[in-house]
Amino acid sequence: MSGTLRRAAAALLRWGRGTGGIGLQGAGVRAAGSGSGSGSGGGQAEQLDALVKKDKVVVFLKGTPEQPQCGFSNAVVQILRLHGVRDYAAYNVLEDPDLRQGIKDYSNWPTIPQVYLNGEFVGGCDILLQMHQNGDLVEELKKLGIRSALLDEKKDQDSK
Amino acid sequence: MLSGQLVRRLGSMATRVRSSPGGAGPEPVGPVEAAIRAKLERALSPEVLELRNESGGHAVPPGSETHFRVAVVSSRFEGLSLLQRHRLVHQTLSEELAGPVHALAIQARTPAQWKENPQVGASPPCLGGSRKTRGTP
């Protein structure tokens, strides 16, 4: 019981930190409702909006980049690692049921992981993998001012 | 005996045959898988539709229908971005995704793309994350 509470509190702290004062307030209200709230309040959409725009690269995972809890989330982490993307925000939806449902509603996307670049929803594991394979990811990262590490490995494959 | 034949015939005709839940061994096609196939066929008239129930590789009970991989080749995907193609598949399967299915790997290709590379991808191994959270609403 207290374990659950502590975990919830930790998740909320992160949540609050991610979204500023508004986030903390909204989170507090949800916590008072003890867990599974309505999930689709207007406040949450605003919080998530701020969350996905706060960092250039944002991912929602099951687990953490250090310890992914799902093969698809792990694949996203590995793809980012391949491109040398180190500075990204990762949110663990397993720690926060509200976030888990909230981000699905916000993105209108039914599964986790989810990837945002520059505040824009890119897709899940399959799409990121495909973008990795067809070279689009290198281009998208470049738009964000991130130079993919893969470019350094094969310099001749520079973009047109 | 007669009813057995009937059931088998129905099974080959349609995809709505209920396989006994909890059956062991190589899984027969379950109701969710059948529904997914029927809906995708109806909505996208795919040239190729490969559907795999990958639930066996995950931390769920035997006979589960929770994790799927689908490769859909359809001319309906022409001119659509990857994101739009995936959304189209999600919309088609919204009921399943809101209910029993919680992982769906999608390959959505046009016939021309499929000709270039007619391969169904492989899913990464499960890392056990859903076990902890099963039972949460």
Image: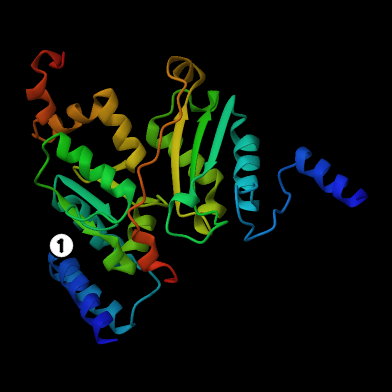
Residue B84 or residue B70, whichever sits in front: B70
Position of A135 compared to A39: left or right? left
* Element at label 1: helix
Residue at image position (60%, 47%) is: B26
Position of A120 compared to B130: left or right? left
Residue at image position (62%, 42%) is: B39
Task: Point out the image quarter for the N terminus of chain A.
Answer: bottom left
Q: Position of residue B71 (x, y in %)?
A: 50, 33
Extreme residue toward the bottom, this view: A2
Q: Say whether residue A40 is visible.
A: no
Position of B82 compared to A87: left or right? right
Which residue lies under the disc numbered 1?
A18
Residue at image position (15%, 62%) is: A18
In the displayed structure, A93 sits above or below B55; it is below
Task: Point out the image quarter for the C terminus of chain A.
Answer: top left
Q: Position of residue A28 (x, y in %)?
A: 23, 79
Corner quadrant of residue A135: top left
